[in-house]
Image (cartoon, grey):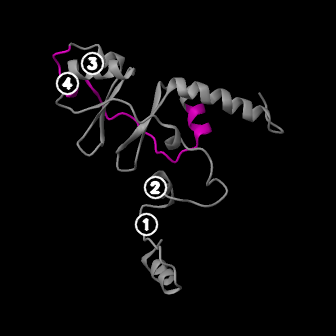
Amino acid sequence: MSPRAACRLEALGFTKVSDYVAGKQDWIANGLPSEGRRANSARIGDLVRKDVPTCSLSESLARVKERVEEAGWDMAVAVSEEGIILGLLQKEQLAAPSDRTVEQVMQAGPSAWRPNLAVDRMVRHAIRFQLPHLMVSTSEGVLVGVLRRSDMDRLAGGIARLSAGKPGASS
């Protein structure tokens, strides 16, 4: 909203007025309240797992491998001190020699999705393109969590059942 509109709303007696420059989608992506027809729709940010192992660039791969195994994951996300996604360690990278650092073996600049995206569309997209996971971050690049393939497959079954029950839906 423009500063003029914010000022006008305050003049009309509204007390919780924000001049949010980033836009509506960013507002929703940050988990802030919204209204409208799709306000209560399931979004991927609501379903991510936040227990994904994280690591710093300078950590030894040996330490990260231990943490990944203990947590029951097959991946880790390299993040900055602020939690910004810097890289990704998947099976291939985790199989590298243990004396290497995360920075030496990580996949730099991995794709991340915003938490406001609709679950049904993102699950269909991930399955269609055989993505092993959906990494979710804020617009600033801060890790929100990961939606694993096993979670997506489970969700896809539910989405298919819901779609089959709608009039005009095809299987």
Q: Which residues are magenta?
A: 98-125
Q: Where is mark 2, residue-wise? A: 26
Q: Which residue is mark 1?
A: 20
Q: Is residue 122 left or right of residue 105?
A: right
Disc 2 versus disc 4: distance between alpha carbons?
Answer: 33 Å
Amino acid at pointer 3: Glu
Q: Is residue 147 above or below residue 20?
A: above
**Does 42 sit left or right of 21 as displayed?**
right
Which dot, 3 or 2, sits closer to the camera? 3
Determine the image quadrant of residue 67: top left
Work out whether mark 3 precedes mark 2 in sequence or the reverse, and give the earlier one.
2
Q: Quadrant of the C terminus?
A: top right
Marks 1,3: beta carbons within 8 A: no
Give the alpha-carbon distance from disc 4 to disc 3, as whole Å: 18 Å
Q: Earlier in the sequence, mark 1 or mark 4?
A: 1
- What percent of the width, then of the height, locates residue 19? 42, 71
Q: Secondary structure at mark 1?
A: loop
**The residue under label 1 is which amino acid type?**
Tyr
For the point 64% across and 60% down, the residue is: 36
Instruction: For mark 2, give the secondary structure.
Output: helix
Which is nearer the N-term, disc 4 or disc 3? 3
Residue 54: x %, y % from top left: 30, 32
Q: Residue at x 49, y 57 (%)?
A: 32
Q: Amino acid at mark 2?
A: Asp
Are discs 1 and 2 less than 8 Å apart at CB?
yes
Q: Which residue is mark 3?
A: 66
Is residue 113 among the parts visible in the rendering? yes
> Element at badge 3?
helix
Q: Which mark is residue 104?
A: 4
